[in-house]
Amino acid sequence: MSDYKNEDFNKRCRAACPICDSELCCWLDRGAGCYSCYISTLKTEEDKKNALSRWEETLSYVPKNIDDLHTTGECQFCKGTPQKATRYATFDMANPEPYSAKGMFFGIGKKVRTPVGSLISVQAGICDDCRKAFRKMDYLHLGVFFAFLIAAFVLLLIPAFVNPMTSLFVLLPVIFVALMALAGFFLGKMLGMNALKKASKTVKIDLGEIPLVRQMLNNGWFFFQANNGMPRLYFKKTKTYERLRKKPENEEEEDIPLDNINI
């Protein structure tokens, strides 16, 4: 579809769309226009209005300045004076509101409330030093795990090592590999957590230390699919989205958007 047709399509859709210029419209647009908006695929006006109502309820639990996490250009994870943000850390947060239900067995049967009514990705600016602290945990965890696994297979290639095992029990080598993998997993995890504990002197390892994230937690949000209370962080050079909430009309434009910084 050409730019001209896109523009014409957008004008016609916006004139008839019940969510036009709303918070949901701002979120779904993302510069792509009405052509890619899923709201236009909903069959009835009531469905569209319900979608808007649910999104407004979701945003009622989100701080109005939530986008400060990624628009200030400062690292949100530094303790003390924040450094310049060079990346974006993204993590998922969920809220039981608004009410949502589905069938008890694979979507079939009696409707029961689901624990997640809203699910959003939160992004925050992060500097290189803080990112490296989080990365170190992952590298140690996976590195030690694979080192133990490789060592187990190398040992099994040595006849003097594996033959006595098989003579005792034919599946003993398999059990040996499994035990080595478990040992590597837990040792790597322990070393990674110790590295983060040391880094916590200068880095907000607990995301709840970030004021805006703490506000969300106080509003009923929780980290989605957390491990030991910590969400999985994904690091990107570019933003996943421009804004979660609609930009206030009286808000001044940023002088130098972080997206345009050479990193």
Image: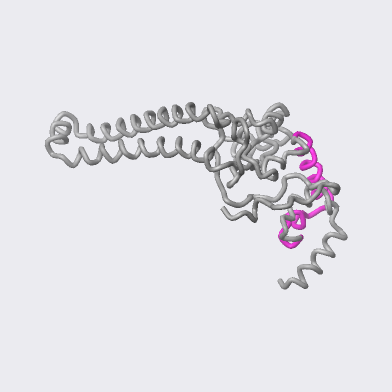
Quadrant hosting residue 34? bottom right
Q: Is residue 112 visible?
A: no
Q: Nearer the viewer, residue 206 or 219?
A: 206
Residue at left 54%, top 38%? 130
Question: In the figure, is residue 135 to the left or right of 183?
Answer: right
Q: Is residue 136 visible?
A: yes
Question: In the figure, is residue 134 to the left or right of 74?
Answer: left
Where is residue 29? Give x, y as percent.
74, 55
Quadrant hosting residue 3? bottom right
Q: Main secondary structure of the magenta part?
A: helix
Q: Which residues are magenta?
A: 34-61
Where is residue 181? Give x, y as percent.
33, 34
Where is residue 249? Give x, y as percent.
85, 49
Asked if residue 46 is positioned above or below residue 147 in the image, the reply reads below
Q: State the count of labels.
A: 0
Residue at left 65%, top 37%? 103
Asked if residue 131 is positioned above or below residue 199 in the image, the reply reads below
Residue at left 71%, top 71%? 1
Whether residue 42 is in magenta: the answer is yes
Whether residue 31 is in magenta: the answer is no
Considering every residue shown, the one lying at the far front of the view is 81
Where is residue 176? Give x, y as percent.
26, 32
Residue at left 45%, top 37%? 136
Question: In the figure, is residue 63 to the left or right of 166?
Answer: right
Colour mapping: one colour
Considering every residue shown, the one lying at the far left of the view is 160
Question: In the figure, is residue 177 to the left or right of 34?
Answer: left
Q: Nearer the viewer, residue 102 or 99?
A: 99
Considering every residue shown, the one lying at the far right of the view is 15
